[in-house]
Structures are given as structure tokens and as C-alpha cells.
Amino acid sequence: MRHLMSPLDFSTEELSNLFDLANDIEKNPGKYAHACAGKKLATCFYEPSTRTRLSFESAMLSLGGNVIGFSDAGSSSAAKGESVSDTIRTISCFADICAMRHPKEGAPMVAAEKSRIPVINAGDGGHQHPTQTLTDLLTIRSLKGRLDNFTIGLCGDLKFGRTVHSLIHALVRYENIKFIFISPEELRIPDYITDMLKEKNIPFEEVIRLEEKMPELDLLYMTRVQRERFFNEEDYVRLKDFYILDKTKMALAKEDMLVLHPLPRVNEISVEVDDDERAAYFKQVQYGVYVRMALILTLLEIKVN
Ligand code: CP
């Protein structure tokens, strides 16, 4: 039995197979419509979500399976003090696979250790968000035709942004990737990540101004400044509108640069950018469903001919 805790749990070859499967699902949805008949997905979300939870549920329903779960820790027995270990032992009696989001780093891993069914980390604190990374990679590969030879700018909350941390770990396995980290001083990328990049001789720069680097970028990954990760409201208010991507900044970018964002957005991308052909963030949401369908099939070892 296999779980997914980090994007590194799959080799690049396995990822390539997963993305091929996701692209086939996109082209031939009918072929997969009953692949998970009789199977159940449990979504155990101890933190709010729109995309991740609903795309998992949509993915399982599109495969002909069923879904159960909770979207709020307060409506589960966690509110009475039940541990994640006991919860997953219970869920293992009800479902065939589980997607879990939790505010504490490592909680899905603790669950996986006690689980009798595959557990998918659907985001754990500021640590990892592997299915967002699968979504990001599938989007890039589908729209650009490759996962190598990019200069990628990551902008916003690079300190707490789990999607950023997961994506960097995944991209370092591809050739000729250069990272440009764009953040205010307070939200800089953690040292353990820059240390890893130095160790692997992967080029990166850290800058504060987005405009300065726009012309160099093949991909721009925008992120939200996350109110829920701040210890005080004053710091959040000071930093929340530090970056706003608008038409003026987009005019500085390459004609084929892609703008990605894991969403939700607050103010960091002006709605006037949504109509720009380079804005890929809503396409990304759609790719998230295909890749989660492919992931469910892969972890349940279901083959469709
Ligand atoms: N991208 C993402 O994780 O969105 P949700 O928080 O809405 O699931």
C-alpha cells in the first residue's frame, strides 16, 4: 500500500506516467467513468478548503465512486479530543482511500502510519501540499510541453507557503531550472530550502521587487499572504498587499510567460489580469481534478484499458 505525503514519493518516471494518465482522462473521460465503482474516498479536512477538497470529491465522483468525510474539525470527533491516529483507524473501516488536510505539519504522516488505506496529504500546515504540486506540474507540462529549462519566479509568501515549498522540491529534479524568489524580507524562503539548492548547485536569486525580474521569467508563481499563518494581525496588514500583479507589470513579461497561482487569491493578482492569455490559474484548477483522478487510480492500483 502506498501513501502520498510529498511529491518526492513518486520518481520522475512515475510522475510522467501519472501525467500521461491525467492527460488521457482529460481526453477520454467516459473511459474512466466507472473505474472506481464501489470504492469510497474519505475527505478529512481539519482546515478550510474549496479547491482541494471539492476537486478530490469531484475526481472520485467522476470515476464512479462515492465520497464521505468532514470539512471542519469542529464537526468531527477531533472536537472531543480524538487523535488523528484513532480517526484514521476509524476511517479505514469506512473508506478505501483518504485525503487529509491538517494545520499541523506531519499530521497526515502520523495518520499514514496507522492507516489500513492509502492516505493522501492534502496540505499540512506550512510544510507540504503534494497534490497542489502535481496540479502545478501537470499544468506546466500540458501548457508548455515540458518540465525542464525554465526560469521560474515565485512571488509572495515564500516563508509559510507550503505550495511553494512542495513545488521547489519537485522542480529541482528537472534539468536547467532557475529559481527567482520574490518576497518581502519578512516572508523570505526558508534557509533549509536555499541550503538544499546550494548543495545541488541549482541557481537562484532573492529579490524584493517583482518588476525587476518580470522580463526574465518563463513562469510566475504568485501566492497569497496567508493571514492564518501570522501571529499578529499588524504584520499581516502591513504585508498583505505587498505585491499586486496588474496589467502594467504583465506588460513587462514575455509573451508566453505563464502566470500560476494555487488560489485562493485575495488582492495579489488584479482581476484585470484574468483575461490575459498568460493567466493559467483557473486552467490549473481544472488540471487539479484530472491529476487527482489519476492519483486515486494509481494509489488504488486500478488499471483501465
Ligand atoms: N490550492 C488550494 O489548496 O486551495 P484550497 O485551500 O481552496 O483547497
Image: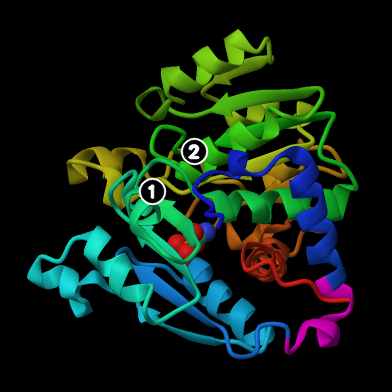
Where 258 sits versus 155, above or below?
below
The amino acid beneath tag 1 is Met
Q: Which residue is mark 1?
A: 109
The amino acid beneath tag 2 is Gly
Q: Residue at 54% of width from left, 79% of height from top?
A: 57
Report the mark closest to the observer, 1 or 2: 1
Label 2 packing within 10 angstroms: few (<14), some (14-19), many (20+): many
Question: What color scheme is it?
Answer: rainbow
Judged left or right of residue 202, residue 20 is right
**Image quarter hosting the C terminus:** bottom right
Tag 2 secondary structure: loop
Of residues 127 and 246, which is closer to you in this image? 127
Q: Specify the label residue 156 is tagged with.
A: 2
Q: What's the CA distance linking mark 1 and mark 2?
A: 27 Å
Judged left or right of residue 181, residue 238 is left
Judged left or right of residue 108, residue 224 is right
Q: Specify the label residue 259 is tagged with.
A: none
Magenta-drawn stretch contains 19: no
Judged left or right of residue 183, residue 288 is right
Where in the figure is residue 15, as x and y percent of width and height?
74, 48
Where in the figure is residue 233, as x and y percent of width and height?
20, 46
Where 267 sits versus 29, above or below?
above
